[in-house]
Image (cartoon, rainbow, N blue to C red):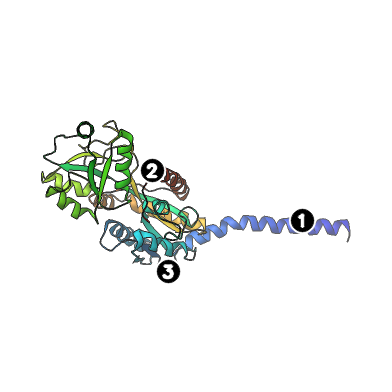
Amino acid sequence: MTTDRRHALKQLALAALGGAVWSLPLASARAQQAFPSRPVRVVVPYAAGGTTDVLARQLFELLGKQWGHAAVIDNRTGAGGNIGADIVAKAEPDGYTLLLTLTNLVQAPLLYTRTKVPFDPLRDFSPISELATTTITLIGQTDLPYTDLKGLVQQARASGKPVIYGTYGQGSTAHLMMEMFGHGVGLKMEHVPYKGEMPLINDMIGGQVPLGVVGANTARTHLQSGKLRALAVNGTSRTPLLPDVPTFQEAGFSGAERRGWFGLLAPAGTPQAITDKIASDVNAALAKPEFRARMLDMGVEFKGSTPVAFATQMKEESAYWAEVIRIANVRLD
């Protein structure tokens, strides 16, 4: 083969390689523009009618109109949300099966054995967007001998008795938050788990449990009636639902800075062009004022983020809750 012929073949190969490289962004853009070409299935691992389900249905109703394909909401309950999450973890990574779930996704593997949680939240999903956060509130009976957190701590220390409180579930964010609070102030805590908020509220009003932790929207209803009193909310800032109620942090106590979140995820390996497209469309929907106001009334404070930001957050959340669960010594198996 002559030198000229070798040179000509080399130039052709380089040209072909360059064309392939340049075609990658074009292919990515085409995939983004074409998605979705059929209905998207959104797995909600909680029961129909709950806040997560309502958020999913209202969000994807908006997106369905934009996409020209109605989304299918698939409620797959059981095992504290793990069954639905596992379905998505094992689905085809093409963007047509999504998971809309809660903070429990990163907490569950730390609370259960691997046999009960067959997925890894960091390895088996492609994060899309942190959709929103939710605030929980420490409330008490109105006849307690204190009206704020400092009074609670002083009274508990003076009595030498455990602080008895209820939450909406064993191993819930509310349960873990209160155990961290107790750890931080050196108080022994006695947790009374309930199956949901309303049984807890009823027992508090009936005088069976002095303190409880519920969603801010649930608390608001009973605070307005004068039947219960709010002591503090979690997070680093007050919630617009209860603007007069201080955070634990404001009251001088740590351990309750994290809020629960709602997140949207796809199976691991879903093309970035597709997750970016979904995130962009989702965040545009979350910006709609009427939608924001409607969900805020249910205790959902919209946020919206990018796939990269949500992936970073999930790693941080996993590390944070691992430490909390270790300190609280909470296991569910």
Q: How far is mark 2 from mark 3, CA to CA?
A: 42 Å
Would you identify the image quadrant in which residue 28 lies?
bottom right
Dot 2: few (<14), some (14–19), or many (≥20) neighbours within 10 Å? Answer: some
From mark 2 to mark 1, how far is it between C-alphas? 60 Å
Name the residue carrying label 2.
324
For marks 2 and 1, the one nearer the N-term is 1
The amino acid beneath tag 3 is Arg
Residue drawn at the location 51% of the way across and 61% of the way down: 31
**Pick the front one: 131 or 82:** 82
Identify the amino acid type marked 1: Gln
Give the CA separation, mark 3 to mark 1: 42 Å
Q: Which circle, 3 or 1, is nearer the viewer?
A: 3
Give the quarter of the figure containing the C terminus. Answer: bottom left
Residue at which label 1 appears:
11
Name which of mark 3 and mark 1 comes first in the sequence. 1
User: What secondary structure is marked by label 2?
Assistant: helix
